Image (spheres, rainbow, N blue to C red):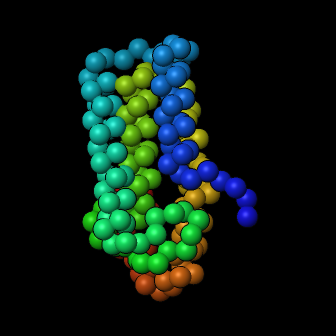
Amino acid sequence: MKFYPLPPLLFFFSVFMIIMASIADLTPISRPDYIAWTGWFLVVAGMTFSYSGSILFNKLRTNISTFKDPDKLVISGPFKISRNPMYVGMVAAMLGTTLVAATYVGMAFLILFIMIVATVYIPFEEGRMIAVFGEEYEEYCLKVRRWL
């Protein structure tokens, strides 16, 4: 198996790089103040949405690790809105960080993060979910979208 960093590590690395780029003023974007406030809202909302999925996994005492087989099919809470609320929250928080930092580098990291999650992590996780839960997961997929 290839080594891939866990999604939260990839997320925090990307946010760190966005912040560093804005501090260094490498690629500043001129933006009105309301865009920064929108960014802060997205950071808080995204982290809250992402964390709510994590809290639910802990409450249900189920595996949250990307590369371990799932042991419960979680379809309540934020999973009624998205099959991947933690990724949706991370993307919203990264977009918010990019708006606050006002840097083009942030957009590049956001796009890269989405591409990696959409082509590596989600397909892997969905494959494991189908292997473990079969028809039950496929029915869930028909009712709830992958992102929103």
The residue lying at 32 percent from left, 60 percent from top is 55
Residue 133: give x, y in percent of width and height: 49, 83
Which quarter of the rendering shows the C terminus? Answer: bottom left
- Residue 145, image x and y in percent? 40, 65
Q: How many marks?
A: 0
Above or below, 112 against 3 in this view is: above
Left or right: 113 in relation to 48: right
In the rendered image, the residue lying farthest to the right is 1
- Residue 104 visible? The answer is no
Query: Residue 54, how many percent across, how many down?
Result: 37, 59
Q: Which residue lies furthest to the bottom in this view?
A: 135
Please tell me whether residue 1 is drawn above or below residue 8 in the rendered image: below
Q: Is residue 70 visible?
A: yes
Query: In the figure, is residue 146 to the left or right of 21?
Result: left
* Rendered-image quadrant of the N terminus: bottom right
Which residue corresponds to the image point at 46% horizontal and 64% vertical from the top-left? 64
Give the camera-side residue of 131 and 35: 131
- Quarter-of-image position of residue 34: top left
Residue 53: x and y in percent read 35, 60
Q: Which residue is drawn at 37% across and 34% down?
A: 96
Residue at x 54%, y 45% (from the top left corner): 9
